[in-house]
Amino acid sequence: MSLLSEVRAVTAMNLRNLPARWTSSLVAVVGVAGVTLVLVAVLSIAEGFRAALELSGSDDVAIVLRSGSTDELTSGLTQDLVPVISDSVGVARLPGGQPIVSPELYVVVDVPIRGKSSAANAPLRGVGPLAGQIRRRLQLVEGRMFEPGTSEVVVGDGAAQQYQGLDVGRTVRWGTTNWTIVGRFTDGGGVAESEIWADSRVLQQAYNRGSFFQSLRVRLLDASAFDAFRAALAADPRLSVRVERESIFYAEQSAFLRTLVTSAGWAIALMMGVGAVFAALNTMYNAVSSRTREIATLRAIGFGATPVVASVLVEAMLLGLLGGLLGGVVAFLGLNGLRSSTLNWQNFSQITFAFTVTPRLVFSGMAYGLLLTFIGGLVPGLRAARAPVTSGLRAV
Amino acid sequence: MTKWLPLVWANLRRRPLRLFFTLGSIVVAFWLFALLEALRSGFATSISMVGVDRLMTLNKTSIIQPLPFAHFARVKAVPGVRDVAFFHWFGGVYRDGKTQIPVYVCDPAALMEVYPELQLPPGAREAWIGDRQGVIVGPAIAARYGISIGDRIPMRSAIYRQRDGSDVWQMNVVAIYDIAQGAATLDKNSFFFHYDYFNESIRAGRDRIGWMVVRVEDPARSTEVAQRIDAVFENSSSETKTSTEKAMARQFADQVGNIGAILVAVVGAVFFTMLLVTANTMAQAVRERTAEIAVLKTLGFRASQVMQLVLAEALLVTLLGGALGLALGGLSIAALGPGIRQFVPVFEMTARTVGLATLLMVAFGVASGAWPAISAMRLRITEALRHS
């Protein structure tokens, strides 16, 4: 018999016997499932940030801030700079020749969190009339856009879900102005959904900002126009600005939160993993010891050590695969799409995100589960193969 | 019971490898428990330890909207107010230049009145008040950037410009401050700089402050004082919102998200798994020893004694593993402490954690041993002996 068919025969026999050891096997499955669940759950938070922040930036949109600003909140640009920047090379234009730019204002307002007594920092963004041409995924799902020049606002879908009282048709008071909510929009899950939008001119007046803006979004002819655009602004002596691709700007904004959550998730999963390896070792040693006689018999009638080790490993990893799948499926069913929000320290305002359980995450969870049970199966397997045949046959 | 301990121990040791693996799972579970519980209670106590006699007055619209400097004097005059300090966010950028570090602009004398837990070496207080470009630095951030007393450091502002257009302020490090043990309002990660000097040197946005912290005369009447402060500025262009520091801290924690719930969920998942592992081991141990237990009963052990023996075995495993896990947890908390306390001011193993862990050990010992113990108790001698 070839080695491969030996392995197949012994493994198949072993797997047929698996139901006899089901309680012990279940422990290994649940142990691995627990680890996978926690790992996938925590990483899906990081994935949610990525979806909200990174994916909302476009390569062909540039964001212009005052030089030295770390974020929109601390930036400031005067009105007279807007035409200078808009006339620069690489800026996309409407058929009528109008440059596609949006001078924007970013302030934070206190809005009560749904179901809690406390309030959170919700971002209130003033946008120019062409903002919709720059964020092309933007879609109104309820009501209408605000009328320029009036104190009307539209709210992002995430913000509407997260905060209390942001329903279309209601009026809220921020600062000294009463704002009427006239619409609700989505942005393909992007960061704009965490925000509330108003006309930037109206917001300037409401917040005594004179003719100051905080950032300028510029739609470029295409993604490759960015370098020329940035070089042109840098060479202009009238300007002292920081220019970033929107995608890179957002990636930077989410970097801190993502690193924090990802490293915390892996740290916990690593420790739990050690516990799960112990559980798997226990299970597999039990499995091997309950098969002592069977294994010894196989060895006595001429089966090699390899099929024995392989059969133990396959059993262990099958349990790991089941556990990993279970954990991943539970995480997906229980968490995927669940919305939550947290504070983005970079601009001191709330960002809403959805737990995002991607296939890739489930796969890494399962791979981790497999690795754990591989370790858990290897040692007992080797021991079983090395055990002397005679004493094995004598075992009860 | 103690006289049976050798018997229980001998039973445990009959399968050293299995004992080792079971203990391993339990050790890891309680190790994680110690760490996560320290983190959770750290978040909770950081909030509850915030001073009760202090109020925070913010712009009603949002904390990022400044208040006029004149509000400072007007709040001081409100009856029931003892001292007032104010802060202004400088938007400090140091070296790496991408993230802001906490540089607060404040009035040194007022700050030290309101925050008695802020500790300076002898003479530093006067030195700081006397040096208009003086800054005091938290020990954690000083260590991170290698800053020491006497340094003159260039601090860039992401928000403000000086009148000459520069955005860099030269600051003289006059002291490294410390925070009294147990206080959690100020962290060890901040810079505190002179408001007077800053205010004179900026190009635009003069005479504004970020928020105020008010120390009241009688903590029992702080709600009343808060209402009084807000009443002063009602219908002005900068209305205020005053709440206790504790309420602010809780609100802030709510903004970050429900960390407590996430940690509890993780610990729950860990323990569920661990319980399963131990229960399975115990069940196996009892199954294997069916004949032995029958012999014990034949020798005159009562059913309840047999049950106690099995339970004791389960308890011994969880207590041993739990104690070891807690010890490792304590060690790693001590090792990780300095790093984590930069973000969570309180991070330690409390008596409450140890007590809670002990309760859990007992609960899990009993829960995992209960079924095997009952089946051992019910065991019929004749049947059991016949089977083997």
Image: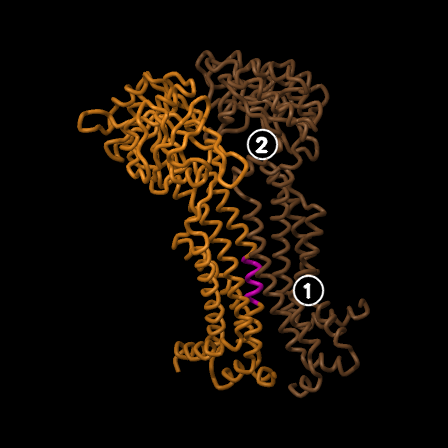
Q: Nearer the viewer, residue B159 or A158?
A: A158
Q: Are marks 1 and 2 on the same chain?
A: yes
Tag shown at residue B366: 1
Look at the image and give the colour of chain A: orange
User: What residue is shown at x 52% (from left), y 39% (from top)?
Assistant: B256
Mark yes or no: residue B286 visible: yes
Q: Is residue A276 magenta?
A: yes
Circle 1 SS class: helix
Q: Nearer the viewer, residue B207 or A87?
A: B207
Q: Is residue B291 above or below residue A24?
A: below
Look at label 2 and name its amino acid. Answer: Met
Chain ID at mark 2: B
Q: Is residue A82 above or below residue A141?
A: above
The percent position of residue B387, horizontal first and vertical second, equals 64, 86
Q: Is residue A297 magenta?
A: no
Look at label 1 and name its amino acid. Answer: Val
Q: Which chain is brown?
A: B
Q: Nearer the viewer, mark 1 or mark 2?
A: 2
Q: How many marks?
A: 2
Magenta-drawn segment: A273-281
* Residue B245 in the figure: left or right of residue A58: right
Q: Nearer the viewer, residue A289 or B311?
A: B311
User: What residue is shown at x 63% (from left), y 37% (from top)?
Assistant: B46
The percent position of residue B48, horizontal first and vertical second, equals 65, 37
Q: Nearer the viewer, residue A77 or B153?
A: A77
Q: Which quadrant holds the N terminus of chain A?
A: bottom left
The residue at which mark 2 appears reads as B248
User: What residue is shown at x 49% (from left), y 57% (from top)?
Assistant: A36
1 or 2: tag closer to the N-terminus:
2
Q: Is residue A34 above or below residue B210?
A: below
